[in-house]
Amino acid sequence: MESREGSNPYNHVKCSLSVNDKEYYYFNLRSVDPGKYDKLPFSIRVLLESGVRNCDGFHVTQQDVEKIYNWEQHQKSEETTEVSFKPSRVILQDFTGVPALVDFAAMRDAVNQFGGNPLKINPICPADLVIDHSVQVDFSRSAKGTAATTDFGSPPTLRVVDLEDAYGSLRSHTARHRLPVFLNLNDDSSNANPMGGRGTPHRTHETEPSFKNSCHSIEHPPAVTRNLNEGSESNVQRSRVPPIRTKCRSQCDGVTCLLSATSVIEAPCLRVEEIKENLDKRLGLTAIPIPDRLCPTLTDRLCPFHHIPSLWSDALDKNQDLEFERNKERFAFLKWGAQNFKNMIVVPPGSGIVHQVNLEYLARVVFDQDGLLYPDSVVGTDSHTTMINGLGVVGWGVGGIEAEAVMLGQAISMVLPQVVGYRIFGQLSQLATSTDVVLTITKHLRQVGVVGKFVEFFGPGVTELSIADRATISNMCPEYGATVGFFPVDEKTIAYLRQTNRPAEQIAYVESYMKAAGMFRDFNNHDEDPVFSETYELDLSTVVPSLSGPKRPQDRIAQTDFKLDFNECLRNKVGFKGFGIAEEKLGTTASFDYEGATYTLRHGSVVIAAITSCTNTSNPSVMLGAGLLAKKAVEAGLEVAPYIKTSLSPGSGVVTYYLKESGVVPALEKLGFNIVGYGCMTCIGNSGPLPDAVVEAIEKNDLVCCGILSGNRNFEGRIHPNTRANYLASPLLVVAYAIAGTVDIDFETEPLGYSADKKPVFLRDIYPTRKEIQAVEQQFVIPAMFQHVYSRITIGSDSWNKLESPKCDLYPWDASSTYIKRPPFFDNMTKDIPALQSIKEAHVLLFLGDSVTTDHISPAGSIARNSPAARYLASHGLSPREFNSYGARRGNDEIMARGTFANIRLINYLVSKPGPRTIHIPSGEEMDIFDAAERYRKEGHDLIVIAGKEYGTGSSRDWAAKGPWKLGVAAVIAESFERIHRSNLVGMGILPLQFLEGQHAKGLGLTGKEKFTINIPQDIKPGQVVDIQVGEGSSFQAQVRIDTDVELAYVRNKGILNYMVRKLA
Ligand code: SF4
């Protein structure tokens, strides 16, 4: 059956809208049924608009639209209601973007083979791909020597701090020529108490120990202070001193390098013309203020955002170098994709975190398609896609096949959701942050249960929250279990669009359209409140500084109760809130040497402190709050123990920009919060190694040491194998606990450390108020920053620009690549749709029970050394340390096929022990699942899988459907299917069959050793019941879980990709 798209029955409700003398038009949803429309939650109005606009009688039917209009009525029904939804766009990150682009590249080949125009294969729906998931914290302040796989040729490079550069700002930069480092913010900092932090009990040096034996000595820089509250460049207070004239040791004899006024330069300085020429040539930029002379050591690295010489810690450069070294093949492929696919933006690595870039730049809020206005909505291949709901854009995370389907212009099928109204009122206290709000909401909504529902925020308190605050709350939606946490568009949304420098024309039509379409909210107007399925509320004034953990984001603890809670967790039996430490082991300590000093770890010691995750890095208030706290801490003489792995990974260049401009970067760096990269980093577990001495001390003494991070997930093993307790907290508290060096501290009664004059310094002494933070934010977070950063977003770093990628329309697959390989989805495909084939005398590859997850079917983690995938990689000359994970290998079907069902916890009733093994039924031999599938394939046998309830539960994962397809599985017979996984199976042309109500495999007396014949009539209908013959004798019936005509078209075509190739060839 082919497409039956018809004309839109709602064309008559299109009406015009004049904005600034320009004519637009839109679908006036209210005019269809004003009584129903005005009661709908705002999030449902977005689904409705999509249904009305895309109604073609095939992908989206009039019944779909009517169901949405009747949302309130469906809420009262016990039955779930499914509707089709076409999002406005798709967003991908690199882990999931690679397999999607691999499929698109293979589709081009297939269309080409059929004599069609391969250039027709492009995303139909706009798609944006941000490369952000690959960078890790190999290098940070305390990880100079710990990165495992790189050789930068010499001891760690050191950081040079310039007091005053030609831009008039305080900066630090990389000295690639091993320059000594000094960072003094205060005149007396060299005399400050070096024992400031509680984690530095035996420190023996007076200042940064690693600089003591430097071959050059230079004078200590004089003091620089900045009055942040007065703050602009013109009124910065400095202790102005003439630049120290240091002799350059090369040709430019005697010239002062302004950027390195305090440094000893080992290489010649260049003239400004040469630098400018260099920049002009490479980037076409001319408006950059260049000082008279620059040190050439600074010009071989360009800050990817400002395209001026990189002035940050060398950790950033080194981590980015390693990122490229590890991912060169994948990046080159993505670069080819960026150059070849239309309707797609690829944001190069090192630019930022996908959801923050989405918020600050990619989100349209309202689309203008040739004058037709409609609301932005998005599905993304990352669970925290939900963040964009803070900006009034409905969006959530989906699996790869669904995302590809949407990119190919298909609709996704979804359950019409219940909508929980969450009323916010009151005002936040001066000390609470948005992180505290989201941890409070997460705990609350987890308790009431919102899984699978939309949450929509309303009430006067919403106006108290900035868009960044709202985005933080929306980001953690997967942690409270909802599908979306939606904030409708209001005046603040429009102000944010201005702040982030969206074009004036766009801002005008966003506001006009949203108002005309009845999607613009006044949170103070109670009369606008829609009908909700149920409501809950939060008084913001009750929110207090909080942390969550030690193992789950919903386990919030008030910071004031934290010490007590941690000590209880130590004693509690092992569980989400327990480590089961015996009474006599509670006082265990472990001493170790690091960088020439001796330190002691105990239970509760902090070893990782990371300002990470788009959850918080997108929020200037908490980032500047951390900076202000750091500044006050440094001024008070506090430090962070050097063995603590501190890091700061901003979610976009804008963060760096405002941190730098507000003058807090030196203080953050002083405490070890150097910028280490632009990507997910510690949030996704890319925290890199800890110092060996720390690892040894923890492991030998079985210590419960802690990670403290501004992230959103903290289950055991995610952050680092050696941090058994992981706490989520605001960036401010991350800095505070890093200084403390332990979570076993009561900030009310115990000082963070001591000042130079031996006075105790408490957290309350250095904690900035919301008012202070807001003042700095207002001054420094300005539209020009967004303009500056995002005008260059697709240019990328030097490494990206130098990366070679093929220049051709069809991707030249490299047969030797173990990362990128043409998938076999179109091998042996015919241009005509083949007849449906019955499944004859199929063997059972696996006989499974209930709740088999997508992680059982296609694990994402490490590749076991004795697995079929490992053998494949070894046969290509790779050693185990080069295997990488299944997640990173999703561009190679051979590896993913070998990794299908490779979960060591898989229970297959055909074998006696859990693991990735099965029986080859004809021979009775036990073997790896992949090997059995291969043997069946060679013998010409059909294969099926039998399963229990909820087959395919867990995160949606494309390879959980692609993998079984590749193994030759033609059908899965299960008691029930997880909704998205079922549609993914259909998308791969695998037949989902469901046992009839009350029946199951064991009840039918099946053993899995029989042969199964499934007769499929040519005129099969969605939901039809078919006969399944068992061996020579008995039979039973099962329902075909093809639910719609669209799905039937996919199955007839043997999958959605083949369907699209036939359509476009
Ligand atoms: S920073 Fe964390 S939440 Fe954000 S995209 Fe990366 S892994 Fe996801």
Image (spheres, rainbow, N blue to C red):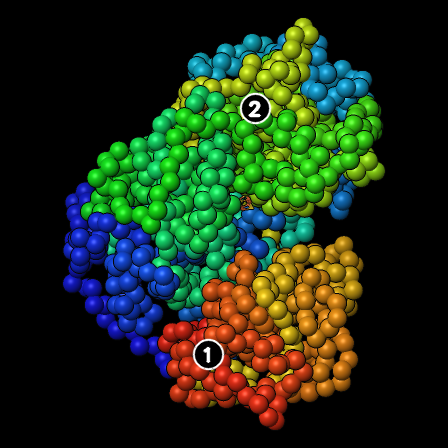
Q: Quadrant of ligand 1?
A: top right
Q: Residues within 10 Å of mark 1 (few under 14, many from 20)?
A: many
Quarter of the N terminus within the rendering? bottom left
Dot placed on the residue nearer the N-terminal end, 2 or 1: 2
Q: Amino acid at mark 2?
A: Thr
Residue 28 visible to an observer of this rendering: no
Q: Residue at x 52, y 82 (%)?
A: 829
Q: Secondary structure at mark 2?
A: helix
Q: Secondary structure at mark 1?
A: strand
Q: Is mark 1 within 8 Å of ligand 1?
A: no
Instruction: From the viewer's perspective, tell me whether residue 89 is left or right of residue 866.
Output: left
Which residue of the protein is positioned furthest toward the bottom in this rendering? 1032
Q: Quadrant of residue 78?
A: bottom left
Q: Amino acid at mark 1?
A: Val
Give how far across and how far down residue 163 sits, in percent: 60, 18
Q: Which residue is mark 1?
A: 1040
Q: Which residue is mark 2?
A: 560
Instruction: From the viewer's perspective, tell me whether residue 450 is left or right of residue 21.
Output: right
Q: Is residue 704 above or below residue 937?
A: above
Which residue of the protein is positioned furthest toward the top in this rendering? 757
Instruction: From the viewer's perspective, tell me whether residue 45 is left or right of residue 891.
Output: left
Q: Residue at x 41, y 85 (%)?
A: 1020
From mark 2 to mark 1, how far is it between C-alphas? 56 Å
Give how far across and how far down residue 160 sits, in percent: 66, 25
